[in-house]
Image (cartoon, grey):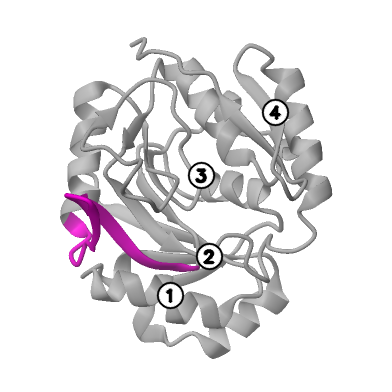
Amino acid sequence: MSSFVVAIPSYNRVNELIRKTLKTLKEGNIKKSHIYIFVANKEQYNLYENEVPKSLYNKIVIGKKGIANQRIFISDYFPVNQYIISMDDDIEKVLYKKGDKLVQIHDLNPLFKDAYKLLKKSGLYIWGIYPVTNPFFMKQEVSFGLKFIIGVMHGYINRHISKLRPSKLSETKEDFEQSILYYLHDGGVVRFNNITTKTKFNAPGGLGTDRHDRNKSAAEYLKRKYPDIITVFTRNNGTYEVRLTRLPYNK
C-alpha cells in the first residue's frame, strides 16, 4: 500500500486543532510523520508554527484561503497516486456503530489501510463516512453508488485531473460537488455507513460564520449544474441544503 498522509486544512482554529483532531490522531496511533497542516497564508503559518506542539505534526504548509481552493491545493501539493486522508481540524472522535451504540475507534491505522484496499479492489478512488452522528440511521454496510462523501473525513487516491475539482461556486458545499464529480468520472464512490465522527459543525473560525448566503449560493449553483442529481430544500432555520439523487454503482 502506498503510505498515507493526513492533510488537515485549518484556518484560525489553533486550539481546536490541538485539542481535537491532533489529539484524535495521536490517540489513534497515527505517527506525526504522516500529518500535514495546511494554512492560508504566512500570518496563519506563524500563528500555527508558534502554537502547535511540533511533536504532533510533520509539516505546516502555506496553501490557499477558502476550503475549495485549499482542497485543490492539497491535491496539487502531493504527487499522483498518493493516498491522502483529509480531516477537518475539529474531529473529537472517530466512531463506529456497534449494535445501537457508537464506539470510539482507538487505532485508526486499520481503518485507513482497509479503506485503501477496498478502493483498489473496487477500482474506485474516494471513500467517506456516514455524515450524521446517529446510530439509529447508520447501517453495517458499505455502499458504492452515488452517496454524499462528507468533507469532514475522507480518503482518496490522488489524481491531478481538473474535472475532479469542485468549483469555487460550490464553496461550503464543495464536498457535495466532489462526491458528484468522482461518481460521474469513476462510476461510484465508497462510503462506510457504519463509521462517523464526533465534531461540531459550523464552529467559529474556518468557515463557521456567515454561511447563510454562501450556502444559498452554493445550493443554487449545484442545482443549475446538476439538475438531475441535486434537490434543494431549506431547513426550519432558513438554511439552504441539498440532497443527492440515489444512483447505482456503475463501474
> Circle 2 is placed at which residue position?
200
Report the front residue among 131 and 221.
131
- Of the residues under marks 2 and 1, which one precedes in the sequence? 1
Does residue 104 show up magenta in the picture? yes
- What amino acid type should be assigned to the residue bearing mark 4? Val
Residue 203: image x %, image y %? 62, 67
- What amino acid type should be assigned to the residue bearing mark 3? Ser
Label drawn at residue 30: none
Q: Main secondary structure of the magenta part?
A: strand
> Circle 3 is placed at which residue position?
75
Q: Residue 15: tell me if it is visible.
A: yes
Residue that appears at 21% across and 33% down: 118
Residue that appears at 46% across and 21% down: 183
SS state under label 3: helix
- Of the residues under marks 3 and 4, which one precedes in the sequence? 3
Position of the N terminus by quadrant: top left
Residue that appears at 54% across and 89% down: 51
- Of the residues under marks 1 and 4, which one precedes in the sequence? 1
Cα separation between marks 2 and 3: 25 Å
Residue that appears at 51% across and 44% down: 75
Task: Decide if residue 203 is on the left or right side of residue 114.
Answer: right
